[in-house]
Image (tube, rainbow, N blue to C red):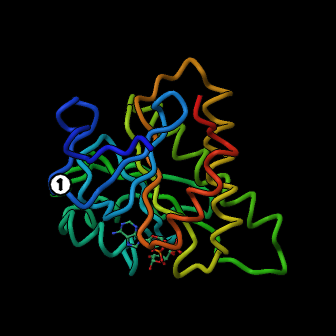
Amino acid sequence: KDIKTIGELYKNGTLHAVEQPKYKFRDLYLNQISLLQGDITKLEIDAIVNAAKKSLLGGGGVDGAIHRAAGPELLEECRTLNGCETGDAKITKGYNLPSRHVIHTVGPVYSSSDVSRKADELASCYRKSMQLAADNNLKHIAFPSISTGVYGYPIVDATHIALGEVRKFLDCNSEIKYDRVIFIVFSDKDKSVYEDLIPQYFPSL
Ligand code: AR6
């Protein structure tokens, strides 16, 4: 299959990354969507999405990694934002990150007793983040797998929501020209879930 290294995309001017070789891309759906495995803090793009907590004051997981890489100025800007509701998103600069912006979104804490509300909240994270990127004229955005770490959302269910909501957003907002939406996963298991489900939402044409 057509897998490109980040270095090749870099040369094409499609994407920029500070550290190269461990990333592999699979481009799908009119080259608008990529699946990437690696560390989101290394991506030199317009915006990376942070799976944050309501206070926006940092934490573990991807949130901790982003704050560590961005440096203390990110926390300073986050303090001015008065937190963020579950399902909502707020934008900051990227500071020491190679990414120019961070879109902080707060996913739901999973509980099996309230599945449909949790699903709506998770979908809202993707929708609001895409909208915020568009409002700021950002052309590349990378999503980690929101809520599927500390917040316990089952990966298969969460991936259906992530892919379905991004597809819906692109279809409903065809006037917005994203260059690329990236889904970035950490583990091999998460990668295989995305690989299995992506064709349902983004068939190669
Ligand atoms: N790059 C890409 N993906 C990553 C990285 C990274 N550097 N680090 C972790 N992941 P989580 P949540 C993956 O727990 O479930 C924090 O404490 C990870 O493998 O970061 O939304 C916040 O402050 C998993 O697949 O986020 C909140 O309190 C995915 O990112 C809470 O955790 C999300 O895992 C949010 O929990």
Is label 1's Cβ within 8 Å of ligand 1? no
Residue 197, how many percent across, how many down?
65, 54
Residue 166, how many percent across, how many down?
61, 42
Q: Secondary structure at mark 1?
A: loop
Residue 130, how many percent across, how many down?
52, 41
Question: What's the residue type where badge 1 is placed?
Answer: Gln
Judging depth in this view, the residue of 157 and 52 nearest the camera is: 157
Residue neighbourhood size for the residue with mark 1, other residues' Cα within 10 Å, grouped as few (<14), some (14–19), many (≥20): some
Q: Quadrant of ligand 1?
A: bottom left
Q: Is residue 178 above or below residue 72?
A: above
146 lies left or right of 112: left
- In the rendered image, the quadrant that contains the C terminus is top right
Residue 83, how many percent across, how many down?
48, 64
User: Who's the residue at 43% across and 45% down the image?
Assistant: 26
Number of marks drawn: 1
Q: Residue furthest front?
A: 1
34 lies left or right of 126: left
- In the rendered image, the quadrant that contains the N terminus is top left
169 lies left or right of 83: right
Q: Is residue 10 above or below residue 86?
A: above
Q: Residue 171 appears in which quarter of the rendering?
A: top right
Q: Which residue is mark 1?
A: 20
User: Who's the residue at 70% across and 45% down the image?
Assistant: 200
User: Who's the residue at 51% across and 37% down the image?
Assistant: 28
